[in-house]
Image (tube, grey):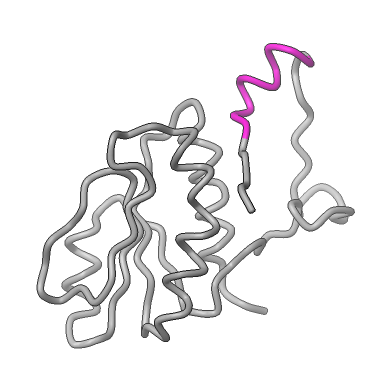
Amino acid sequence: MSYIIEAIEEIEKVAGPLIIRTKENVEPNAPGMLSRHYAPETKTYLTSKLMNMIERFEGKKIGVLVFKNKVLDSRISYVEVLSSNGNYEEAASNLYGAMHRLDEFKLDVILAEKLPDHDLGKTINDRLERASKNKE
């Protein structure tokens, strides 16, 4: 099953300005509005400083989710690349499958690399941020 995530900017081109409702200003009425949506069971961290986070969890079974550049480091158990050629649509389509595959490896932690925060990258970062929320 493929998931397509549209950038807010693309939607606004067609529909006009959107009103963004969050947990802080309204009760969620759809799963995508939950603060923790499509999150793996494995504790997940969103970071723009991937190597620092790898050092922080050295000695743990680490999975890494990256946008386009595969990270080679002996401390990493598994790596998922969302789009080897840096295509945002491909990355969005691969996001949930990659998170679920990493979750299946029974890792101690998943480290997700923050994408460039513009266009569709902003939307993917939102999903990754939700996936990294603490369970309540």
Q: Residue at x 89, y 54 (%)?
A: 29
Compared with 28, 79 (above or below) is below
How many discs appear? 0
Q: Position of residue 30 (x, y in %)?
A: 84, 53
Residue depicted at x 79% and y 29%: 19
Residue 30 located left or right of residue 54: right
**Is 109 above or below relative to 79?**
below
Q: Residue 10 colored magenta?
A: yes
Q: Is residue 131 magenta?
A: no
Quadrant of the image occupied by residue 20 = top right
- The boundaries of the magenta stretch are 6-15
- Of 61 and 19, which appears nearest the observer? 61
Res 115 → quadrant: top left
**Is 42 placed above or below 90 here?**
below
Q: Residue 83: x, y in percent?
A: 35, 42
Q: Nearer the viewer, residue 62 or 34?
A: 62
- Quadrant that contains the C terminus: bottom right
